[in-house]
Amino acid sequence: MRQAVLDLEESMIRRVANAGMGRSDVLKFWFGESDQVTPQFIRDAAVLSLQNGETFYAHNLGLPELREAITGYANGLRAPGATEIGAGRIAVTSGGVNALMLAVQALVNSGDEVVVVTPVWPNLTGQPAIMGGIVKPVSLKPIAGQWQLDMAELLAAVTSRTKLLILNAPNNPTGWTLSRAQQQTILAHCRETGTWILADEVYERLYFEPTANGCAPSFLDISGANDRVVVANSFSKSFLMTGWRLGWLVMPPEMTVQMGKLIEFNTSCAPVFIQRAGLAAIERTLDVTPRVVAHLKICRDTLVPLLQAVPGVQVAPAKGGMYAFFRLVDQSKYADSLQVAQRLVLEAGLGLAPGNAFMAHNGTQPNADAQGWLRWCFASQDLGRLEQGVQRLKSWL
């Protein structure tokens, strides 16, 4: 097998989860998904599609009506003055993961330099590595528990040698979010260096700060149709559809035709009945997303103060996403977050994701920006589970 594949890290989140599989007493907060079932009307749309016999191939880029619906949805979220997005810039994909991998396949040659802002969901550093890219991490800095980007460091890292800059904001795991001014600075810099931007914006609707359009700042608000900007999004988080595997890409129109060819060699197309479910979700987004975001804010505002009250825990409320990313202050005891997470499962019945999972591995030396941290997915219907989890953590400490 290719060395790049052999060198991939096994999912540390899965390693922790495997330690608790089969145990009904474990409170599971390790995976990044809500415990709410997909709304009935979305499921009904998929069932109806199957009953109507829609079991055949679709267009590589997706059903025309779904691409049009995504266009209307995306344009409805844009800031005043934003370039209007046409369906010719949309590709429907088999999940957000697939969207991101397709973009990386399209852009990254072996040996290309790829800058990634970390800590970050491990797929975003693993995908360019699979393609033979040279990953250069730029670390967010925790200040009083709140993660911040050193813009001078990022701009110095992105040069004319940098083929691709990957950004995930709102960020998994930290909740860090780019400001509009930061996005404008980054876009202007990348225009000068000729660097592509891949923006993972799957959490754009899960944003808790007051805004006119109800979402986090997006590169689609400030970029032109022909800018070297690709934005990935997904139905998973905002529509409670993680298991459906449906996402989309927004890209320059000249790239879309080529992306259709690339989709053919990956998945051919997203299943039609799943696309019908996505169409139903977008048509009734006001019945789903605002409720999801309101509940997640309640979850965040329940969990974070409880964690802040635990001696030896450092945490700040995230502006977006569905995670509390916190640090156990006594690093003489808790420096290895994978080991800590495994112990918490076995000894306290508490399932969290280790910070190690979100570090970028550059050759043999990991970028240790998330070492000693733990991620808690707070997307829980039952707030009592969050309270019980904090009590288990406190007792274990």
Image (cartoon, grey):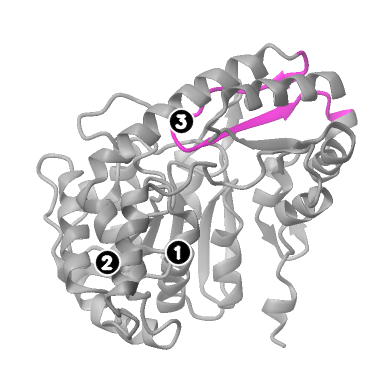
Helix, strand or loop at mark 2: loop
Query: Which residue does the image show at 38% across and 47% down from the upper left?
Result: 39
Counting residues from the start of the chain, the first of labels 3 and 2 encountered is 2
Queried whether the magenta region covers residue 249, the answer comes back as no
Query: Which residue does the image show at 82% across and 40% down from the upper left?
Result: 345
- The answer for how far apart the CA atoms under marks 2 and 1 are is 20 Å
Q: Which mark is residue 245?
A: 1
* Residue 266: percent from left, percent from top: 45, 83
Q: Are marks 3 and 1 in contact (CB under 8 Å)?
A: no
What amino acid is found at the position of numbered circle 2 in the picture?
Met
Task: Find the magenta span and give its range.
Answer: 311-332
- The answer for how far apart the CA atoms under marks 3 and 2 are is 30 Å
* Residue 73: percent from left, percent from top: 20, 51
Query: Which residue does the image show at 38% across and 50% down from the upper left?
Result: 201
Counting residues from the start of the chain, the first of labels 2 and 1 encountered is 1
**Vertical side of 120 occupied by 112: above or below:** below
From the image, tell me which residue sits under label 2. Answer: 251
Which quarter of the figure is the N terminus placed in?
bottom right
* Residue 5: percent from left, percent from top: 68, 78
What amino acid is found at the position of numbered circle 1 in the picture?
Arg
What amino acid is found at the position of numbered circle 3 in the picture?
Leu
Q: Residues within 10 Å of mark 1 (few under 14, many from 20)?
A: some
**Vertical side of 347 occupied by 40: above or below:** below
Left-right relation of 369 to 247: right
